[in-house]
Amino acid sequence: MGRYLLGIDGGGTKTHACIVDLDGNILATAANGGANWERIGVDAVQKNLAEIIDRVCAKASISKTEIVDSTFALAGLDWEEDEELLAPIINSLGLEGRCQLINDSFAALFAGIPQGIGCVSIAGTGGKSAGRTVSKSVQTMGMELGEGGGAGQLVDIALDLIARAHHRIVEKTQLYEQIPQSVGFDNPTDFFTAIARGRVILDESLAPLIFKLADEGDSLAIEVVIRVASQHALDIQGIIKQLDFSGVPVELIRAGGLHTAANALFDRVFEQTLKASSPGVTMRVLDVSPVFGAIMHAAHHHFKEVSPEFISNLTSAAQKVEI
């Protein structure tokens, strides 16, 4: 009977699973639908987690009873009461080993920084910022109040600005024309009527259009990108203050679609805003799946000290695995 570690990274639209042996060698990975209970409900999360665990165990040719430690890094796990809500789901999955529940932002942190000490900025479908020291961890609320909201916030601000343009408060630009056109409306009044009556709901798929128009010099699109990038940087400033990283070099991992889009304006504003208050921050974009951070978190929980060999085996293999 073997001994293995399981990592789960559950986002809003997709869940990734990975199983490794105690030397950090990857046995199997799998993917299926989302695992954010706020979006799909608790029952759907339980169903998706049970399905993906069965699938990844089958691919690895192991039994669930052989998993000695696991970490579930789930979106929507923002408050203590969320853990109380989700713990029964984890207990129902038939895992005999120890299980940890963490917010999915920490999986991205451990994926980029194996020791898990530093900060992470998530700017994807939504937004989340978090950080850890040896003794403390903090995270933003994940509710777009006083914090960055990723692509969703990008679209919300764009909608507000084109409404202002409709009222002649600000000048009309191509953003005013192209957002309605992107969802089938040539007449902005018809578009706003549909928005008001709930016949059209804009989603994060509009983010590339906003980035494109900003690149082309559209003033309203530029304002949208600047506001969102600045806010995500301010979130990390707040995390650094809460963790008292003052005077200590801080590593930052950037993850999510807005950070990986390589949009020059977003990247420049984010970096300049953050370095204005924290010039010693070093940052890089995450280049592996966050599920490998869930595995690393499980390893830290299982071993008294994670060996350099385990870290090397996992990180080198993670670069080659596409889930």
Image (cartoon, grey):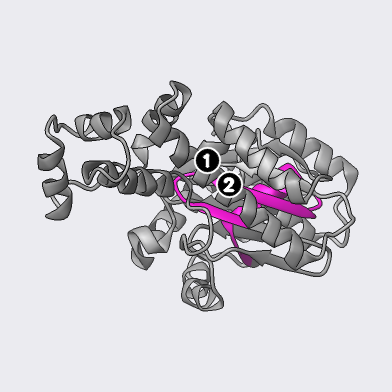
308 and 97: which is toward the camera = 308
**Which quadrant of the view contains residue 208?**
top left
Determine whether, in the image, residue 120 is placed left or right of residue 86. right
| Magenta span contains residue 115 | yes
| Magenta span contains residue 111 | yes
Label 1 secondary element: helix
Instruction: Determine which residue is flagged by label 2.
Output: 230
Determine whether, in the image, residue 259 is placed left or right of residue 167. right
Q: Position of residue 270 (x, y in %)?
A: 63, 41
Residue shown at the point (42%, 32%) measured from the top left: 219
Label 2 secondary element: helix
Image height check: is 303 above or below 263? Answer: below
Looking at the rendering, in which quadrant would you find the C terminus?
top right
Q: CA distance from mark 2 to mark 1?
A: 6 Å
**Which quadrant of the view contains residue 283?**
top right
Instruction: Determine which residue is flagged by label 1.
Output: 226
Q: Position of residue 59 (x, y in %)?
A: 54, 39
114 and 243: which is toward the camera = 243
Identify the magenta region: 100-129
Q: Position of residue 152 (x, y in %)?
A: 40, 48
Looking at the rendering, in which quadrant would you find the N terminus?
bottom right
Q: Amino acid at mark 2?
A: Ser
Residue shown at the point (60%, 42%) measured from the top left: 255
- All told, the count of numbered labels is 2
Crowdedness near tag 1: few (<14), some (14–19) or many (≥20) residues, C-alpha within 10 Å: some
**Which quadrant of the view contains residue 266?**
top right
